[in-house]
Image (cartoon, coloured by chain):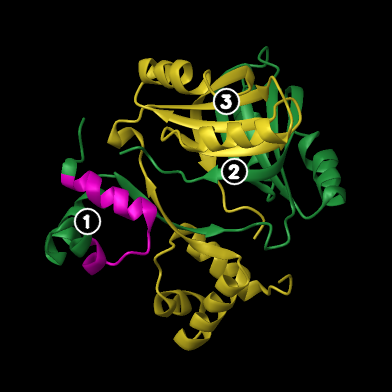
Chain colours: A green, B yellow
Amino acid sequence: MQKADATDRRLLRQLQAEASLTTADLAERVGLSPAQVARRIERMERDGVILGYGAVIDWRALGYAVAVSLRVTLDKTQPRAFDEFLAAARMIAEVDEIQTFLGRVDLRLNVLARDMAHYQHIYRTNILTLPHIADIEALMLVADVKNSESLAL
Amino acid sequence: MSDLDDMDRAILKALAEDGRLSAGALGRRLGLSQPATWRRVRRLEDAGILKGRRVRLNPEALGFGVTVFLGIKLATKGRISLEDFERAVIAIPEVQLVQHVLGLYDYRLRVVARDLADFERVLRRRIMTLPGVGNVEANVLLSEERRTGPL
């Protein structure tokens, strides 16, 4: 189902580049009246095209210098492995992303820690105790080379 | 800036969920005056902790049905090959995220495509032809939860 026309996409491209643009800024950039822009934005929020607006937090600046991507394979002979693993992973405050996959790994957790000692503590007390783990691989973040979350609209 | 208090954390938490909250609305929610809230938000911005706002779009509603995470190992290493690879990969519009990592792979990528056929096109024409690219592993995203993290 197509929920956005060409004008909507133009608005979304502007918003993706700069989420803090006001209705008046947007109107000027796409050549509509502010009222028309407001109506389109409202419709896209109602239709679930725009899900919301979140603040971007720099975890390093907040003192979380370590970010590790943990790629987990589960013991699939356990029928409730996914549900039980996910429920337990949601309880770990330092986990800020949980993804499930079709592929070589089943899940990924993104873990934030203040330093390596803190990471080791989380890994031993919170991660290794999660249920139904068959295997874990870790990728440690060196740097974000690109982080746009933009869609090629 | 590591001297964050509970109010700063509450502000970050509220803004992570709704980045468009005004200082007034935020203050009312947390029992703080509008100027005091504004000063705290400003301080978090100046410290580089609050880096801005981002619109969250629904990829499926806009015709992007497939998200794939790629792990990429470079075949050749060295400063020049890293730079060549990075320059080329960030220019691909379907690639949302490029992370230089340590471990089994050298880079993690998040790729968004219209469907599996579109993903195959991106993989064959854009990813596999990147300078220095070696082993590539693909995992198709089934579900995703973003959480506020340790606030």
Among the 4 quarters of the image, the one containing residue A132:
top right
Residue B23 point in image, percent of width and height? 44, 78
Chain bearing tag 2 is A
- Given residues A101 and A125, the one toward you in this image is A101
Task: Please check the rendered image and state whether residue A8 is part of the magenta-colored stretch, yes or no.
Answer: yes
Q: Which residues are magenta?
A: A7-26
Residue at 21% over, 30% down = A1
Residue A145's label in the rendered image is: 2
**Residue A87 visible at all:** no
Crowding near the residue tagged with mark 3, few <14, some 14–19, many ≥20 C-alpha atoms within 10 Å: many
- Given residues A26 and B21, the one toward you in this image is A26
Chain bearing tag 3 is B
Nearer mark to the viewer, of 2 and 1: 2
In the rendered picture of this protein, how many numbered marks are placed on residues? 3
Residue A36 point in image, percent of width and height? 12, 59
| SS at circle 1 | helix
Among the 4 quarters of the image, the one containing residue A9:
top left
Instruction: State the CA–CA distance, disc 2 to disc 1.
Output: 33 Å
